[in-house]
Image (cartoon, rainbow, N blue to C red):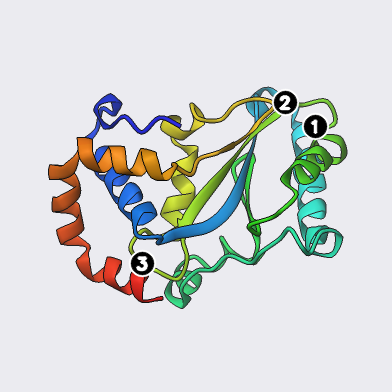
Amino acid sequence: MNFDRKGIELDKDRDWLDRRMIAFKHNLMNQRFLYWDIIGSRKMEKVDRNNVQNLLIQYLNNLDKRHPEDIKNFLITEHTKRYKGSYYKGNYWCIQGDGIILGITSNANLQRIVDELSHEVLGGYVARTAIGYYTGNNNFVLPDYDMYVLDFPYFKNQMVLGQINDTRPSREQIEEYYRENSEHIKRMESIHTQSIYIGEER
């Protein structure tokens, strides 16, 4: 995973990365999800694309019965549920374009799920995957935005074919980020003191 703040062009994206690292530091970003994205879906024939979408929805609707130990409902605030209710109507899954976001447990057998998606849904097409994280029941980083950013080019570049890439930074990476970007981190922490405090109280 690339946590080089200098390599990001826009200030708002740098601020987003600062917030993300603060959330990891304070154990706010502790809920996992699987992001699965079909490659080259826009080049698919319309019939194929519709077929894949239908198979995908069927698979997701039955996933909690097939693998209940791997699936976890999104831990989001009531405000977010009201605001983005249709987006989270699957409770533990949502479709975003030609990708899915799937709430997963800490010990989920993701390779099994990814293999099943490949064989039962894609039928010869290819997808890439990553494990992402969001801040459960905390508005410090809104879950819908936090999930959405996986669709940005920054995160697409972190996804590797044939590998489930875990985007969680190590403790060493977090500490290094704090050392190298202390002025930005301190400013951002001062803005979000209340949210950080709430997160540590849980």
Q: What's under tag 2, amino acid-wise?
A: Met
Q: CA distance from mark 1 to mark 3?
A: 39 Å
| 139 and 42: which is toward the camera | 139
Q: Which residue is mark 3?
A: 139
**Image quadrant assignment for residue 118:** top right
| 138 and 169: which is toward the camera | 169
Q: Residue, x 24% and y 33% (percent of image)?
A: 10
Residue 72, visible in the rendered structure = yes
21 left or right, relative to 132: left
Q: Residue, x 65% and y 27% (percent of image)?
A: 39
| 100 and 190: which is toward the camera | 190
- Is 22 above or below relative to 165? below
Residue 160: percent from the left, percent from the top? 60, 26
Residue 12, visible in the rendered structure = no
Residue 40: percent from the left, percent from the top? 65, 24
Q: Which quarter of the rendering shows the C terminus? A: bottom left
Q: What's under tag 1, amino acid-wise?
A: Asp
